[in-house]
Amino acid sequence: MKVNNNNRVAIKMAIALILGLVVGIGCLLLRENLMANGNADAWTKINNILFQDISAEGATSALGIFYIIGQLFVNSLQLIIVPMVFTSIALAMCKISDTKKLGRISFKTISGFLVTSFFALALAGIIGFIIKNLGLFTANVDNVTAQVGVASSTNPLLVIVNVIPNNIISVFSKNSEVLAVVFIAVVTGLCINNLGDKIKVLKTVLEEVNSIITVFLTFVITKFGPIAIFVLITRTFAIYGVENLKPALVYVVVTIITLLLFLVFGYAIFVAVGARLNPFKFVKKIGKVALFGFSTSSSAATLPLNTKTTTEELGVDKDIASFILPLGMTVNMNGTAIMQVIATIFIASSAGYDVTIGNIVVISLIALIASVGTPAAPGAGAIILFTVLSGMGYNNDGAILAYSLILAINRPIEMLVTSLNVVGDAATSVVVAKSEGMLDEKVYNAD
């Protein structure tokens, strides 16, 4: 019965996605038609009523119905990110009494992340290099203006320093410090484990909070998920605009194809080879997680559904999923890394830089490190891209203009990037769980 309910939710989400695409593209075409015929005021009125970001400057009188509905849903998921990550990881650490086993699971998890990252970066580098040599990675950036401010450059190694926070309260007050929350949760769980029966009340509190989160999560996703997907997809296409896509269509197409290749085939092969399981079962069941990630463009907002699907439909032990998925959300960013490699090659080529195979190797390494520090939030990958450009010294006027172009057109790519990121976490969970004998194959193989 549980599987049937999950299938119904997946079907509703798929229908919502299709309807969102149809209505969104219809709104996009309406916008283009009104703009072309001198009726910009008419579109402005429609946009203010339905799609306008009411938090933006000058939007004090806008209704923004679709924006409000979508933001309420995303906020309701982001609301539970920190408590869910903390309680789930802390409880997972409590239940692993064998320290050797914990070390083994951690090693396998990081190894899985690195293996998939290596092949993802290799694929991105090879495709990017081929397209660049074909002379297709060029864009006229002379008249491009930035739609958002250029991000400031930071040292990617700060990610390591920030793992251990200097203020525990500030870490729990925002969603941007998830890696630090993971560290605190691991330490807390191991300490509770070490103290044994001396710590009973705190463990009970963690279990009860985790149960509350699960009930809340199930309600939000099953009741409001399909509506939210329709609203988010429709709004994305309605506000996008064809004029933003034309200058860098090749970049968009190449990146999307690369992401789709790794999403559909890369992880399926990883599960088939690494876990010796039927990859088609994995692809079928993880589909709604990919759709949800695509709709929200946020790994953090997708974490609750990913956890539910990985444990209840893929048969991964809850302790394994509770450890790997939150960790993967912060450090396993294959989709982000692919996007950054191809985007950097595109920007460098457009700005007149010579990009060699050696350059691409260095770009890939910097992208891997930078992607680890990418916040699990919409649009974050394109902002962190500036770190990669700075690391390579691609900072002339042409590069800055091309970077601004990426910021303008990157929304559909960011959506697919999120799908790749969250599916990768689930795939690693399956492989590690199978190797530890902590995967229920009956659940995994069930229809």
Image (tube, rainbow, N blue to C red):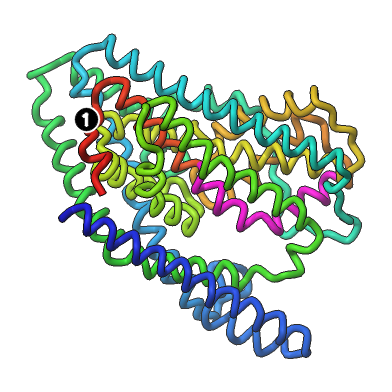
| Residue 261 position by quadrant | top right
Q: Which residues are magenta?
A: 399-420
- The residue at 42%/36% (across/down) is 425
Can residue 168 be seen at all in this image of the molecule? no
Given the image, on which type of amino acid does mark 1 rest? Leu
* Residue 404 included in the magenta stretch of the image: yes
What residue sits 30% from the left and 46% below the top? 309
Q: Give me the residue at 56% from left, 29% from top.
A: 117
Q: Nearer the viewer, residue 133 or 150?
A: 133
Lateral position of residue 259 relative to residue 293, left or right = right
Specify whether 415 is left or right of 426.
Answer: right
Residue sitting at x 69%, y 88%: 41
Counting from the top left corner in percent of width and height, residue 13 is at 38, 63
Does 290 sit above or below residue 114? below
SS at badge 1: helix
Q: Across the whole image, how many numbered discs are drawn on residues?
A: 1
Residue 224 shows in the view = yes
Q: Crowdedness of circle 1 by 10 Å Cα count: few (<14), some, many (20+)?
A: many
Q: Which residue is mark 1?
A: 91
- Main SS, magenta residues: helix
Q: Is residue 129 left or right of residue 73?
A: right
Q: Could you tell me residue 329's position as x and y percent?
A: 44, 38
Q: Quadrant of residue 242?
A: bottom right
Indicate whether 36 appears above or below 338: below
